Amino acid sequence: MKKAYYREQALERIARDVITAYDPRLYYGSPAAIPIEDIIEAQGLVLEYQYLRNNGRVLGETIFDDGLTAIYDRENHRYDLLPVKGGTILIDCSLCEEEASTGRLRFTCAHELGHWLLHKKLFCGTGENAALRSGNESDNTLEVQANLLGSILLLPLPQVKRCFYQLRSGRTNQQLVTDMAGIFQVSKQAMRIRLENHNLL
Ligand SMILES: [Zn+2]
């Protein structure tokens, strides 16, 4: 299978196109949380919440072709096969529970959208949905790409910079990371990594 290598700038452009197609203000206006679930649906994808495994080890799955996928039936303690359409993103219900972090749910959605945007040409028609279960580390390059695009979708660089310069005065780095993570609705860790990678911290 041929893999495409995307430079970070190319991923920034893909994210910009997807976000501005949904609402340019999210990219050019005041920094705000990216409504990732709405954007997924606006891309024509179906977003569905199911228990994917009994142990929460698979958090998301992108379905490229119509078929069947395993989901976990919690009441009957067994796996079932769910008919799914190509262009479906499945998210594990454990991420929607009250104690789960919003940042983790949002990042999983963004990661799966990343797979769809980058990898649908590789997978459509192959019936290989399973290759893209998060947590399956058999193909690390694809996971790294989806992680990077996921992070860029939730934290578009111009917005991160805008927010950083608006907020930095009078704040410690720790406060800045906390406040910016709150604005973009991401984990503090994701926020810190994005800032560090662009030498803003
Ligand atoms: Zn993945």
Image (cartoon, rainbow, N blue to C red):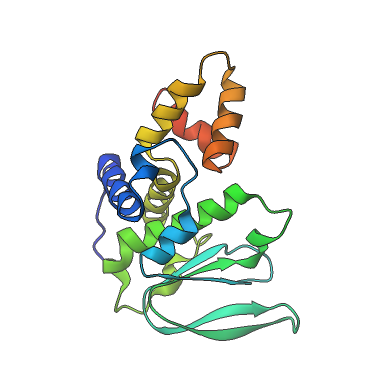
108 to the left or right of 129? right
Q: Position of residue 8 (x, y in %)?
A: 30, 41
- Please tell me which residue lies in front, 3 or 113: 113
> Is residue 105 among what the camera can see?
yes
> Is residue 138 among what the camera can see?
no
Residue occupying the far top of the picture: 170
Q: Residue at x 52, y 35 (%)?
A: 191
Image quadrant assignment for residue 132 = bottom left
Q: Quadrant of the N terminus?
A: bottom left
- Please tell me which residue lies in front, 153 or 72: 153
Q: In the rendered picture of this protein, how many numbered marks are placed on residues?
A: 0
Q: Position of residue 188 (x, y in %)?
A: 59, 36
153 to the left or right of 118? right
- Please tell me which residue lies in front, 77 or 9: 9
Q: Relative to residue 90, is residue 82 depicted above or below?
A: below
47 to the left or right of 113? right
Q: Residue at x 42, y 81 (%)?
A: 85
Q: Residue at x 25, y 50 (%)?
A: 5
Q: Position of residue 73 (x, y in %)?
A: 68, 80
Q: Relative to residue 194, is residue 141 depicted above or below?
A: below
Q: Residue at x 38, y 60 (%)?
A: 115
Q: Relative to residue 164, is residue 2 depicted above or below?
A: below
Image quadrant assignment for residue 199 = top left
109 to the left or right of 171? left
